[in-house]
Amino acid sequence: MTKKKYIGQLVSIKYSDRPTPIFGFVINYNEEWTLLKYNPVDYVIDGYIILRHKNIQGFRRDSNEKFREKVIMLKKQHLPDISDLPLTNLETILSSLTKKYGVFQFDLKTEKACYLGKLKSFTTSKLTIDYLNPKGLWTKQMQFRPNDIRTIEFDTDYIKSLKLVSKKSKHKT
């Protein structure tokens, strides 16, 4: 994506190694990352997603995307403006998300598994998170190679739900 004219418009983005495209409204982008209001299915907006450009095959804005956009706009599904979220580098992104939202989710090269957590530490070769499991429990620390991160989601219904459970569990102990 090279033209700022797509900001505020719904596009689909296809990775060369994933079967399904990712849909969303473009909020901001740079050479390495694109920030979208996430449209995971049909005419629903659910949080945000940041996409690493590595392995992106292309993006589209044709009649399908325009129709989705029209329906979503008619439903008035708007999210707060977060265009000031820094897309400088991965460490800055994850630090900002941890500070502002408490929890983020990311996928690696495959869409078969995702990891939720908050940033614990970061080096160029190792990213450590406090891991939030699918039951809403903070169970362990996990380490990943930063360059393997493909997508980052935040402020979604799933993440907010697990945050609620984790807060409730914390108060019981």
Image (spheres, grey):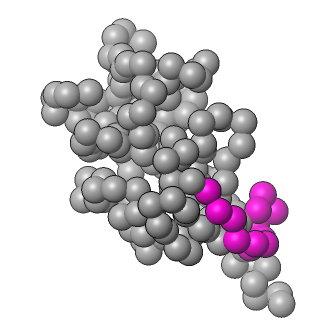
> Number of labelled discs?
0
**Foreground pick, 79 / 83:** 83
Q: In screen coordinates, is 121 left or right of 54?
A: right
Q: In screen coordinates, is 130 left or right of 25?
A: right
**Foreground pick, 60 / 71:** 60
**Foreground pick, 75 / 15:** 15
Asked whether the viewer can see residue 76, the reply is: no
Estimate the x, y position of residue 61 in percent, counting from the top left. Answer: 33, 16
Residue at image position (45%, 61%) is: 124
Taking 28 as reference, is 11 above or below it? above
Q: In screen coordinates, is 95 left or right of 136?
A: left
Q: In screen coordinates, is 15 left or right of 162?
A: left
Residue 121 among magenta residues: no
Classify the position of the N terminus by image quarter: top left
Asked whether the viewer can see residue 115, the reply is: yes
Outermost residue, front side: 125
Estimate the x, y position of residue 163 in percent, counting from the top left. Answer: 65, 68
Taking 20 as reference, is 153 above or below it? below
Estimate the x, y position of residue 84 in percent, counting from the top left. Answer: 24, 59
Residue at image position (42%, 40%) is: 52
Estimate the x, y position of residue 144 in percent, counting from the top left. Answer: 61, 56
Residue 138 among magenta residues: yes
Q: Quadrant of residue 93 in the image?
A: bottom left
Q: Quadrant of residue 13 in the image?
A: top left
The magenta stretch spans which residues? Answer: 133-144
Q: Quadrant of residue 94 in the image?
A: bottom left
Residue at image position (60%, 44%) is: 107
Classify the position of the C terminus by image quarter: bottom right
Residue at image position (76%, 88%) is: 171
